[in-house]
Amino acid sequence: MSDITPLENLGEFGLIRRIQETVTLRQPSTRLGIGDDAAILAPEAGHDLVVSTDLLVEGVHFDLTFCPLKHVGYKAVAVNVSDIAAMNATPTQLVVGLAIGSRYSVEAIDELYEGMRLACEAYNVDLVGGDTTASRGGLTISITALGQVPHGQAVRRSGAQPNDLLCVTGDLGGAFLGLQVLEREKAAWSADPDMQPELSKYPYVLQRQLRPEARMDVIHELRDLGVVPTSMIDVSDGLASEVLHLCKASGTGARVFSENLPAANPMLEVAEEFQLDPIMCMLNGGEDYELLFTIPLKDHDKIKNHPDITVLGHMTDASDGVNLITKQGQPIPLRAQGWQHF
Ligand code: ADP
Ligand code: MG
């Protein structure tokens, strides 16, 4: 690292001014951003507002040993946008609360905001405010995202019906394996600080872990295809856990065919190296931030050629339970083994 400027040199208001100077506003619904007692927003007529908040704590949700602050900033925004996407909404504004530990410099906070700025650009959202305080511990980042959705088109977890198709975007398990790689390298590095981490062999899974993307692209494409999912959730804790959430909220069961689970080749290779069952990685690994949703059977033709949507199976009556169907046709009850922070 080149320069290290203590945060005291800027003070709280100097830091806020510095943040304000780098922020670009893009949304017509943002009337006033950073700098007053509150932001002023004017949502489009005929739309509903959605709001979601996430708290990220150093040492619990991120670890700065191998994760650059720029990636932490990008991911913090992306995971919030993912929640907005999972409501079938478009993100519009963010507010960011920071509690900053004493070992952080001005340059470190610049890097964090550089990541958030890149994500704001990628998802076309405006950073319109926040709060800043010192912390006795590490860094805590709280982000609240706002979004809008045409009235009546917000998608809840509770709308799935028996026979609806259960679909997922992208591929699964990569982020979990990326974390396994980072943890192995961190353990090796703790034992011998001179060792060089072996990370360049694993670009795909590391990118899945360190710099996930919210699937806003799929939300826009579904809108273009005229498909409104009957239920939706984003995959943050692991597919099994999310399928159970949809089933519980909708009062249905589900059949997920193990042969249909979307596996990327780099994920399979790393799973083999770590001697982990790729099916378990795809079912229970967290943080892929893909979208899991259900659609009526009649919409199958509209999505069947989409390269980034996989039909995993279908919803059933609640009495059939929530099952993984093996290659041999054997049903195995799905259980949630997602992230446990506590
Ligand atoms: P107050 O004392 O009324 O809370 P602040 O001095 O905390 O006001 O905030 C001044 C302005 O700067 C507000 O618009 C606030 O939303 C914004 N702001 C404060 N901290 C941050 C931050 N970390 N990121 C973005 N905006 C911030
Ligand atoms: Mg404040």
Image (cartoon, helix red, strand yellow):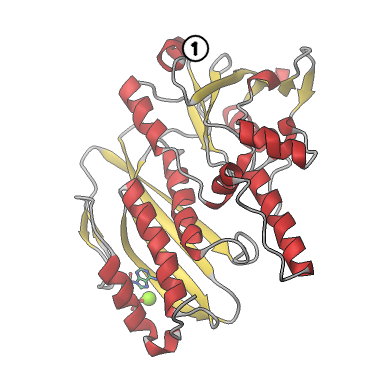
Q: Is mark 1 within 8 Å of ligand 1?
A: no
Q: Residue at x 79, y 23 (%)?
A: 332
Residue type, mark 1 in image: Leu
Secondary structure state at the residue bearing disc 1: helix
Left or right side of 161 for 20? left
Q: How many marks?
A: 1
The vertical placement of 104 against 282, above or below, is: below
* Residue 154 locus on image (x, y percent): 39, 35
Q: Pick whichever, 11 or 96, lies toward us.
A: 11
Quarter assignment of residue 129: bottom left
* Residue 334 locus on image (x, y percent): 74, 29
Residue 306 in view of the camera? yes
Residue 342 in view of the camera? no
Q: Pick whichever, 245 or 72, lies toward us.
A: 72
User: Quarter holding the C terminus?
Assistant: bottom right
Quarter of image, ligand 2? bottom left
Left or right side of 15 for 46? left
Residue that mark 1 sits on = 297
Left or right side of 321 for 264? left
Q: Pick whichever, 195 or 212, lies toward us.
A: 195
